[in-house]
Amino acid sequence: MLVDVIIIVNRVADYGNLTVANALADNGRIQNHCSHLSCLKCSIEDGCNVAGYFAWSLMDNYEFGNGYTLRFGMNWVNFTNPADRREKDSGKWYSRFVAK
């Protein structure tokens, strides 16, 4: 039986009290996604039928269980002025990765 695997939520949390500079330089998120995608590539080469991979999340957002204390996004959001958004290093990395 052939089963498709879809990774629907791969996420890395940062605590929300980081400085903007530290939040934007989210190398741990890059390492996490890079590691997971590398292992996923090995699984595909071993015959696993991977149908999709989704990183959580595009934007920092309100987490129902934790309010605004955790950040999961590849784009930083100023929670006091949500129009103020900046791409994190992980967003830049992920954009280059999927473009290849």
Image: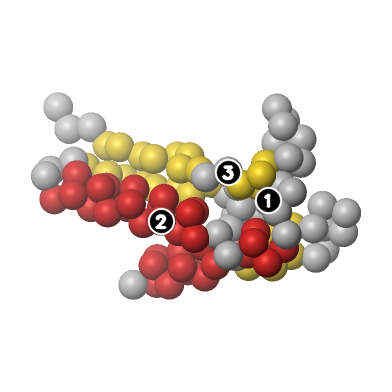
Residue under numbered circle 3: 13
Q: Residue at x 34, y 48 (%)?
A: 36
Residue under numbered circle 2: 31
Mark 3 and mark 1 residues within 8 Å of each other at the beta carbon = no
Mark 2 and mark 1 residues within 8 Å of each other at the beta carbon = no
In this picture, is 99 found above or below 26? below
Q: Residues within 10 Å of mark 3 (few under 14, many from 20)?
A: some
Residue 4 place in picture, x, y as percent: 27, 37
Q: Residue at x 58, y 43 (%)?
A: 13
Relative to residue 100, is residue 91 drawn left or right?
right
In this picture, is 39 found above or below 20? above
Badge 2 element:
helix
User: Farthest right residue?
Assistant: 80
Q: Residue at x 48, y 49 (%)?
A: 55
User: Farthest left residue?
Assistant: 46
Residue 79 place in picture, x, y as percent: 82, 52
Amino acid beneath label 1: Asp
Q: Residue at x 46, y 68 (%)?
A: 93
Instruction: For marks 2 and 1, give the CA distance.
Output: 18 Å
Instruction: For marks 2 and 3, give the CA distance.
Output: 13 Å
Q: Earlier in the sequence, mark 3 or mark 1?
A: 3
Q: Quadrant of the N terminus?
A: top left
Instruction: Determine which of the numbered discs, if any, sits on residue 97 in the image.
Output: none
Residue under numbered circle 1: 60
Relative to residue 55, is residue 3 drawn left or right?
left
